[in-house]
Image: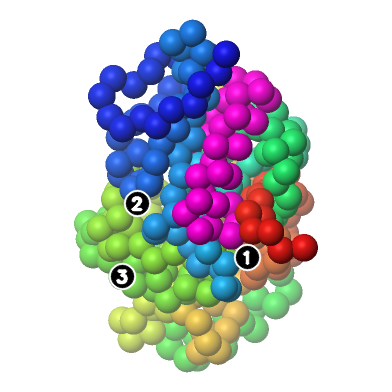
Amino acid sequence: MITVEEWCGGDYPQSTRLPDFDTSVITHHQADVHLVALHQQQMVGRLSLWWNQVPKLNSERLGVVGHFDAVDASVASDLLLQARQRLKARGCTVMVGPMDGNTWRRYRWVNDAGSEPLFFLEPGNPPAYVDYFLQAGFRPMARYISSLVADLNTQDPRIPAACERLQKQGISWRALDMSRFEDELKAIYQLSIQSFSGNFLYTPITEAGFLQQYQSVQAVVEPQLVLLAEQQGELLGYLFAIPDLNQARRGEVVDTCVLKTVAVLPGRRAAGLGAVLVAECHRIARDMGYRRVIHALMHASNKSKNLSSHYGQSIREYTLYQYDLDDRP
């Protein structure tokens, strides 16, 4: 028999069938409750729920489910039923998942893995997890893709004119200055919260939280692959790419870099800058000896996907799911 209980600290239940889990993230991610599913004193599933600090979506009151793992469909069903009941009791109208609290952290399931292995910093999941959510009554809420640029000589014909226009405006771009890493990150943070504020399910993040995320990868950053575009000292846009270190872990030559983020100040002032930064990233990566660039985790309808479509082919698809909790017909 499976029981579902709240975990409120103390010894964490043992499990030989679930992936390793750092319980400190429950507090760090400010989860409102953490549930564990037990069978014969062994943990067979877990998830966390959020309802206080969650993304906004029109007039809906969101509840969020994340930190999810389950050994089989029966455990998943029990856990997700508990999640629905608890979130509805808190007045939530829509349950969203998987998401570890907000979109700055791990979220989405891989629903079409393709043939490419996981790249560096890409979240993965057992294929069955998609089925568990669908069987529990979830439906797709948003779709995302990653694409691969296999030929870094491919040109976007719009780029030369865009470069010339931006340079006439006094806009230039440079590599990240590692000697001023924290100061550079603070400027990137200020631009990010402006650039991303209109994104789907955007949640504000503190400067300290942002710095912590990026400082965790400082040791593996290649500064040439992080571009900052400025006009008279003001940051107007940036691009963040990083070597695919998963290749090294598999014993392969690292010939791929992962383009994680492109952000540009909203408005027409820097029109075309995102496309120019992407083209520059490809050129620099090629000159550094990379053969491929992965454009990572793009919302299926956003500008990044439009930029990527000039170069790459989709290698992976991901889905974020929702479950309607209210009783509307």
Query: With respect to residue 300, does 24 lie above or below?
Result: above
Q: CA distance from mark 3 to mark 1?
A: 21 Å
Residue in the picture at 28% in, 29% down = 9
Mark 2 vs 3, N-terminal side: 3
The crowding category of the residue bearing disc 2, from other C-alpha atoms within 10 Å (few below 14, some 14 to 19, many at least 20), is few
On-image quarter of the C terminus: bottom right
On-image quarter of the N terminus: top right
Mark 1 vs 2, N-terminal side: 2
Q: Residue 172: within the magenta?
A: no
The crowding category of the residue bearing disc 3, from other C-alpha atoms within 10 Å (few below 14, some 14 to 19, many at least 20), is some
Q: Residue 186: image x %, image y %?
A: 28, 66
Residue in the picture at 68% in, 25% down = 73
Residue 2 left/right relative to 155: left
Identify the secondary structure beneath mark 3: helix
Q: Residue 303: image x %, image y %?
A: 64, 70
Q: Residue 23: image x %, image y %?
A: 34, 31
Camera sees residue 218: no
**Dot 2 amino acid type:** Tyr
Residue located beneath label 1 in the image? 304
Query: With respect to residue 166, does 221 lie above or below?
Result: above
Residue in the picture at 34% in, 38% down = 25
Residue located beneath label 2 in the image? 214
> Badges 1 and 2: C-beta atoms under 8 Å apart?
no
Extent of the magenta region: 67-96
Residue located beneath label 3 in the image? 187
Camera sees residue 30: yes
